[in-house]
């Protein structure tokens, strides 16, 4: 089967946990979360001291590319919740969600954490996963008619096309047509940019 290339922007934010299992003798935990996005991007939240219902400040944005965009249901975002202690760390629980669900489903995810099959709390987080497309715009020809004379002379003119797509503001400028009231351009540069369908 032919590989299908996919490019995406991913944002993970608004991370919080509820009713975590206590790992310390004090009846609390010092939790933090470890995110693993298809082994492509890994990052941790900060540690929240003595808190079984922590809210984390992480807001992670990155680009993701895969040669198997038609197999996203077999790729996962995995999350481990750990208890940070003096000697290292203590496992609280984990969960995972497939990437097909992330790109097609809701932004908010509320998942049960499991430790050896036993519930150990819940985690909530938001994921925006948006596919990026590469666009090429071809200008076959362009004509402007009825440009008035300037100071009694036929004007010289050029055309400029641009995109207002965020992060991809590109300009294409034509050659200059000298002393013509009805200039025509037949061969122009392509306008190329990457964006998602929402921003078009």
Image (cartoon, helix red, strand yellow):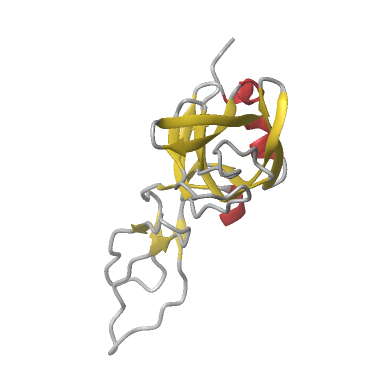
| Viewer-proximal residue among 18 and 100 | 18
Q: Position of residue 180 (x, y in %)?
A: 34, 71
User: Residue lying furthest top in this view?
Assistant: 1
Residue at 54% across / 17% down in the picture? 3
Quadrant (top left/top right/bottom left/bottom right) for the C terminus: bottom right
Q: Is residue 78 visible?
A: no
Residue at 28% across / 90% down in the picture? 151
Height in image: 198 above or below 67?
below
Q: Is residue 57 left or right of residue 72?
A: left
Residue at 57% across / 54% down in the picture? 55
Quadrant (top left/top right/bottom left/bottom right) for the N terminus: top right
Height in image: 90 above or below 9?
above
Q: How many marks?
A: 0
Q: Position of residue 35 (x, y in %)?
A: 51, 35
Q: Is residue 119 left or right of residue 31?
A: right
Q: Position of residue 174 (x, y in %)?
A: 33, 59
Residue at 64% across / 30% down in the picture? 95
User: Residue lying furthest bottom in this view?
Assistant: 151
Q: Is residue 188 visible?
A: yes
Q: Is residue 153 left or right of residue 88?
A: left
Q: Position of residue 161 (x, y in %)?
A: 42, 61
Height in image: 150 above or below 63?
below
| Viewer-proximal residue among 32 and 193 | 32
Q: Quadrant of residue 44?
A: top left
């Amino acid at each position: 089967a032919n590989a299908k290339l996919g490019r995406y922007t991913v944002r993970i934010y608004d991370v919080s946990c509820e009713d975590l299992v206590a790992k310390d003798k004090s009846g609390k935990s010092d939790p933090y979360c470890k995110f693993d996005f298809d082994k492509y991007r890994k990052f941790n939240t900060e540690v929240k001291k003595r808190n079984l219902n922590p809210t984390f400040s992480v807001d992670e944005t990155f680009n993701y590319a895969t040669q198997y965009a038609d197999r996203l249901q077999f790729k996962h975002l995995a999350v481990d919740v750990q208890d940070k202690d003096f000697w290292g760390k203590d496992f609280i629980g984990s969960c995972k969600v497939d990437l097909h669900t992330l790109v097609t489903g809701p932004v908010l995810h509320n998942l049960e954490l499991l430790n050896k099959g036993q519930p150990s709390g819940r985690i909530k987080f938001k994921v925006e996963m948006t596919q990026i497309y590469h666009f090429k715009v071809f200008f076959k020809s362009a004509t402007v008619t009825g440009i008035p004379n300037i100071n009694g002379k036929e004007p010289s003119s050029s055309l400029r096309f641009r995109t207002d797509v965020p992060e991809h503001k590109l300009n294409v400028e034509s050659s200059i047509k000298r002393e013509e009231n009805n200039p025509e351009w037949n061969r122009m540069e392509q306008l190329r940019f990457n964006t998602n369908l929402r921003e078009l």
